Image (cartoon, rainbow, N blue to C red):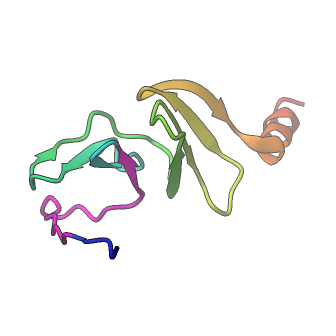
């Protein structure tokens, strides 16, 4: 049996380029852009937050509950539980820099 596919074209908000699209059920979510949701009906639910850091990628748990925002080539990460911040990770390099400034 050959699977059938349906193409759906979703329009992005004017001036916003998707940065990290991940599936959450039947919805595409751009967590790096603050949680913009692209529904398969073509509707767009606006962002809920604006992260102050330059995260450029995101991964989600299979359930969609946990989301990790991170820098692909960096040491920073942000862990979200159902969209709420749980933990911020700043890597060893930043910890060393901050301790050197305090000396």
| Farthest-out residue, front | 1
Q: Is residue 25 left or right of residue 15?
A: right
Q: In which quarter of the image is the N terminus?
A: bottom left
User: Is residue 69 part of the magenta span, yes or no?
Assistant: no
Residue at image position (45%, 42%) is 52
Q: In this view, does 45 lie to the left or right of 85?
A: left
Q: In which quarter of the image is the C terminus?
A: top right
Task: Work out whether residue 2 or residue 52 is closer to the camera in this orientation and state it.
Answer: 2
Residue 34's place in the image compared with 83, above or below, is below
- Residue 50, how many percent across, how many down? 35, 40
Q: Is residue 61 left or right of residue 92?
A: left
The magenta span reads 6-24
- Residue 81, how many percent across, how many down? 50, 25
Task: Work out whether residue 6 or residue 27 is closer to the camera in this orientation and state it.
Answer: 6
User: Is residue 17 part of the magenta span, yes or no?
Assistant: yes
Q: How many marks?
A: 0
Residue 90, located in which quarter of the rendered image?
Answer: top right
Residue 90's place in the image compared with 15, above or below, is above
Residue at image position (57%, 37%) is 78
- Would residue 55 be visible to someone looking at this image? no
- Residue 79, how many percent across, how many down? 57, 33
Task: Work out whether residue 7 or residue 53 is closer to the camera in this orientation and state it.
Answer: 7
- Residue 57, how many percent across, how many down? 51, 56
SS majority, magenta:
loop
Residue 91's place in the image compared with 85, above or below, is below
Residue at image position (51%, 30%) is 80
Q: In this view, does 1 lie to the left or right of 101?
A: left
Residue at image position (50%, 58%) is 56
- Would residue 10 be visible to someone looking at this image? yes
């Amino acid at each position: 049996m050959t699977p059938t596919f349906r193409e759906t074209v979703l329009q992005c908000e004017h001036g916003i380029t998707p940065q990290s699209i991940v599936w959450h059920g039947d919805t595409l979510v751009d967590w790096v852009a603050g949680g913009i949701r692209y529904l398969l009906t073509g509707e767009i639910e606006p962002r809920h937050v604006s992260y102050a850091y330059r995260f450029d990628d995101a991964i989600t748990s299979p359930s969609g509950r946990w989301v990790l925002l991170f820098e692909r080539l960096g040491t920073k990460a942000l862990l979200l539980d159902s969209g709420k911040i749980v933990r911020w990770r700043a890597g060893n390099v930043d910890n060393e820099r901050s301790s050197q400034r305090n000396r």
